[in-house]
Image (cartoon, rainbow, N blue to C red):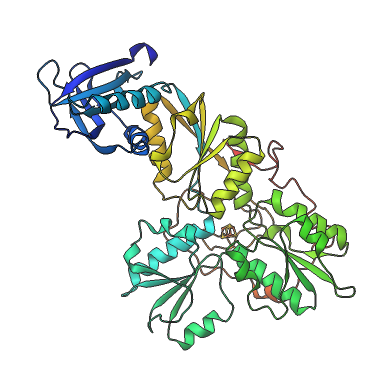
């Protein structure tokens, strides 16, 4: 690549106004043919940050014939002979702007090199959320009016792309939803009184509550019914927390950290149970459970088969990228909970995370030395952002994209598959991670006997949380991963 690199000043036939920069998305070059310029948004981003007016378009080189624009370009040939590069044009008389553009292109061409990009093999949305979206999609095809989605978390909004955002409306409760409408309950669940209220209002509920959330809710219900004091090991800010705890006759206590456990005031006489909130990485929740068990040796907890490993698998991927990449680009809204989790996991494993919410935000200095780039899309990122980043980086030298699959699966008696809604066999095969099914199974329900009574033969107390390696620690190999 370096041997074919060419930096030139040329002329083009496009009209460029004084004061504006035309950043090339492709160049018709007299010797190199069509030059692809997928890194154009990176050039445009740098110029925009400098307060310059940017326009995107193709350039046709006319040199040595008279031209209407001055073009600055650096191009190279890949191993197949195809031409790639970066280029921008200014008005021929605009010397000050030409100098600025030259400096920007120099900075970007300085990071041209062959790279590897490591990323995940599955979309950031968990199986439960993908199933919710599939059910929304289906509801849209059958409903004659808009479909109302109850309390969609912010992360789900960009994922509504590809359905029909005009016909999906977010609501916080049923007030104002017209009679006869379809209302979708999200994966995080809802108040248990909702079906009754919906029925009284003549609404059709599509219950997309994740089976893991439903199982945790059933666990909390049954423990409270037995007279236990329930402690939830989880996070108040996570979407599933209200779905697990809303309407319980005795409000549970929430512990988010070992410090919370130390500060917990517990009854002397009542037995204590712990419900693990799904959706949290095992590496973060199990130390809390262990601390709780240290205080309450007779603690009864959720069965490990009911644990959700989605966050654990994502944290394993983040740890892997942190160890193997020079920098890890995290795509997503800077203030989103999921973005914060990815940042925490990467930084905690010694990596270099940077957060971006648009491809134009990438800086050349992030890519130095940059032989291996990590890419982690947050659930808050628009769905196409990760691909846009890959595309842009492919214009800075040959890029090899390597996708890694991190997936855990409990073999025991887990809740129904959150993606398909199907009951899982006792020796469950790995779920198909690659797509939303066209046909969901019956609404996943926690079996009545499970909801109503504690499991028989559980390894309580002592069996709960005894496997701290359950896919959480990087490098232990405890989480089954496939290349
Ligand atoms: S419990 Fe797991 S699969 Fe279900 S919604 Fe939460 S993260 Fe997704």
Foreground residue, 331 or 105?
105
Quarter of the picture holding the C terminus: top right
Locate residue 400, reporting x and y percent.
Answer: 45, 28
Q: Residue furthest top?
A: 3
Foreground residue, 441 or 383?
383
Foreground residue, 268 or 222?
268
Locate residue 330, reporting x and y percent.
Answer: 51, 42
Is residue 403 something one can see in this rendering? no
Q: Residue furthest bottom?
A: 200
Q: Seen in the image, is 190 located left or right of residue 451?
A: left
Q: Residue at x 46, y 59 (%)?
A: 156
Q: Residue at x 48, y 65 (%)?
A: 152
Q: Quadrant of residue 26?
A: top left
Q: Residue furthest left?
A: 66
Q: Quadrant of residue 318?
A: top right
Q: Vertical placement of 232 versus 387: above or below?
A: below
Quarter of the picture holding the N terminus: top left
Is residue 447 something one can see in this rendering? yes
Which quadrant of the frame does ligand 1 lie within?
bottom right
Q: Residue at x 57, y 82 (%)?
A: 193
Q: Quadrant of residue 53?
A: top left
Q: Seen in the image, is 344 located left or right of residue 110?
A: right
Q: Seen in the image, is 332 located left or right of residue 319?
A: left
Foreground residue, 383 or 482?
383
Locate residue 2, reporting x and y percent.
Answer: 39, 14
Looking at the rendered structure, the number of numbered marks drawn on it comes to: 0
Q: Seen in the image, is 439 located left or right of residue 286?
A: left
Q: Residue at x 42, y 27 (%)?
A: 399
């Amino acid at each position: 690549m370096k041997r074919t690199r060419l930096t030139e000043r040329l002329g083009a036939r496009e009209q460029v106004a004084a004061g504006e920069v035309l950043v090339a998305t492709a160049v018709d070059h007299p010797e190199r043919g069509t030059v692809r310029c997928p890194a154009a948004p990176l050039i445009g981003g740098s110029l925009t940050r400098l307060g310059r007016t940017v326009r995107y378009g193709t350039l046709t080189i006319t040199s040595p014939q008279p031209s209407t624009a001055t073009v600055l370009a650096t191009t190279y040939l890949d191993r197949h002979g195809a031409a790639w590069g970066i280029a921008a044009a200014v008005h021929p008389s605009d010397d000050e702007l030409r100098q600025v553009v030259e400096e920007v292109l120099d900075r970007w061409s300085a990071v041209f090199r062959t790279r590897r990009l490591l990323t995940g093999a599955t979309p950031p949305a968990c199986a439960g959320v993908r199933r919710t979206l599939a059910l929304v999609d289906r509801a849209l095809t059958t409903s004659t009016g808009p479909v109302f989605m109850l309390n969609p978390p912010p992360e789900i909004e960009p994922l509504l792309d590809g359905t029909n955002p005009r016909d999906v409306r977010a609501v916080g409760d049923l007030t104002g939803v017209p009679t006869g409408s379809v209302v979708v309950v999200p994966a995080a669940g809802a108040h248990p009184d909702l079906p009754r209220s919906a029925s009284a209002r003549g609404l059709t509920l599509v219950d997309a509550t994740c089976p893991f959330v439903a199982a945790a809710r059933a666990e909390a219900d049954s423990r409270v019914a037995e007279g236990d004091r329930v402690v939830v090991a989880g996070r108040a800010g996570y979407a599933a927390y209200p779905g697990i705890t809303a309407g319980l006759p005795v409000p549970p206590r929430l512990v988010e950290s070992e410090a919370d456990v130390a500060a917990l005031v517990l009854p002397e006489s009542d037995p204590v149970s712990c419900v693990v909130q799904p959706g949290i990485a095992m590496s973060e929740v199990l130390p809390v459970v262990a601390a709780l068990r240290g205080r309450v040796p007779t603690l009864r907890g959720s069965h490990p088969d009911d644990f959700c490993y989605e966050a654990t698998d994502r944290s394993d991927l983040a740890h892997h990228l942190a160890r193997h990449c020079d920098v890890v680009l995290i795509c997503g809204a800077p203030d989103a909970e999921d973005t914060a989790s990815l940042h925490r996991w990467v930084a905690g494993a010694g990596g270099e995370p940077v957060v971006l919410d648009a491809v134009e935000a990438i800086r050349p200095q992030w890519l130095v030395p940059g032989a291996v780039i990590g890419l982690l899309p947050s659930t808050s990122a628009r769905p196409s952002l990760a691909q846009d980043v890959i595309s842009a980086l492919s214009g800075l030298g040959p890029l090899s994209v390597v996708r890694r699959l991190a997936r855990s699966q409990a073999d025991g008696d887990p809740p129904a598959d959150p993606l398909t809604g199907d009951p899982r066999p006792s020796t469950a095969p790995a779920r198909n991670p690659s797509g939303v099914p066209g046909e969901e199974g019956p609404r996943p329900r926690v079996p009545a006997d499970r909801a109503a009574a504690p499991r028989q033969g559980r390894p309580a107390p002592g069996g709960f949380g005894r496997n701290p390696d359950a896919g959480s620690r990087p490098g232990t190999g405890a989480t089954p991963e496939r290349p």
